[in-house]
Image (spheres, rainbow, N blue to C red):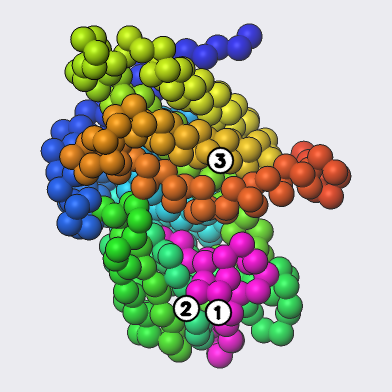
Amino acid sequence: MIDFSLTEEHQMLRDSVRDFAEREVGPIISEYDKRQKSVYPQVLPKMGELGILGVCIPEKLEGSGLDYLALAIVSEELERMDTSLRVIMSVHTALSSLSLYQWGTTEQQEKYLIPQAKGKKIGAFGLTEPNTGSDVANLKTKAVVEGDEFVLNGAKQWISLVEVADNFLIFAKLGKEKGYRGIAAFIVEKEFSGVSTTSFHDKLGIRTGDTGEIILQDVRVPKENLLGQEGEGFKIAMSALDNGRFTVAAGACGLIKASIDASVEYCHERKAFGQEIGKFELIQEHLAYMQAGYDQSQLLVYKCAWMKNQGLKNTRETAIAKWQATNHASDAANRAIQIHGANGYSGDFPVERYWRNARANTILEGTNEIQKLIQGSFLLGYRKPTSLRCTLPAYEHES
């Protein structure tokens, strides 16, 4: 039987996250966006207290012990307010914490994952480099073994949470191995000697977020901070991106919903030719397309959540959800501006911010061109669907 209803627990989670976003962020988000001021220092402690920074982490690791549908709901509600809030879930929870959950040793989980699940520490993800985005095999950051340590040198760029993170999951080339087999993953604390960070400004969107660069200069990392085995870095990165893309797709649903809500409100307020503009059929057509995009995107996300809850491999399904949902979000934000007319072009209305934020989602966590290639390669048989199981859902681990 297919059941699309939310459990009482999921409904309560949705309502609590929505209330948090509207109460704590709603009154300040416009001003912070105009000033390009990060909301993270203000909201991260409160998100930790609410328990949503460990939403998919088992209770035995101090997480909330909820499932992947809960992660989707939180991501949607956060981005319904602003994309920068959802970025926290994508980076801290999906990319960093879930990687530590799936690949970390008991010692690594006790030292890093438990504080992250409680919101006491913040984790970030360092894969992209100044000259390396989609071409992961050509990372320039190097790791060299010296005694009981790895020495890292290189640079990471477009890293979210760069200034507020306590540690980074850094990917580097190890030894002389070439291509994917030579990549390793390391847990690098921000306080390690040789680590420096810089924030970017004047971004098109997500201006209340914290994005920047990490410089690694002779950074000594203890061998016990190697995540997984030597040469498993690419596999770890790809599993992390499956989780990250899932949260991006879910968040995009929230941006679509925000665009619809703002447009419906404006349609009732704005009058032209003696009536509400919502009475005009071409306005209703815009709203119809926006709603269709929301329904389609949410169904794709919920399918992925179900697969992840079953522990099923979901790379293809997550890729298409990310591709379609972010495209629909861009379209919805664009239509919202059109409905608002000249006012939509003004910073006095939120739809202008939605449009700027939506553009980033088609690029980050793997461009939508990459998501299309994933679909094509599966269809042509160049990639083979497997029966390999991904990280088991938290509630199964509790049993």
Residue labelled with disc 2 = 155
Instruction: Give the quadrant of the N terminus.
Output: top right
Residue with the mark numbered 3: 322
Task: Compute the Cα span from label 1 to label 2.
Answer: 6 Å
| 298 relative to 134, above or below | above
Name the residue: 52% across, 67% down.
Answer: 128
Give the residue type at disc 3: Lys
State yes or no: residue 133 in magenta.
Answer: yes
- Give the residue displayed 22% in from the left and 28% down from the top: 19
Amino acid type at image mark 1: Thr
Residue bounds of the magenta highlight: 124-150
Compared with residue 95, is residue 173 higher up or lower down, i.e. above or below? below
Left or right for 12, reference 293: left
218 lies above or below 313: below
Q: Earlier in the sequence, mark 1 or mark 2?
A: 1
Q: Residue at (46%, 55%) from the top-left corner?
A: 96
Q: Does the magenta-highlighted stretch encompass residue 41? A: no
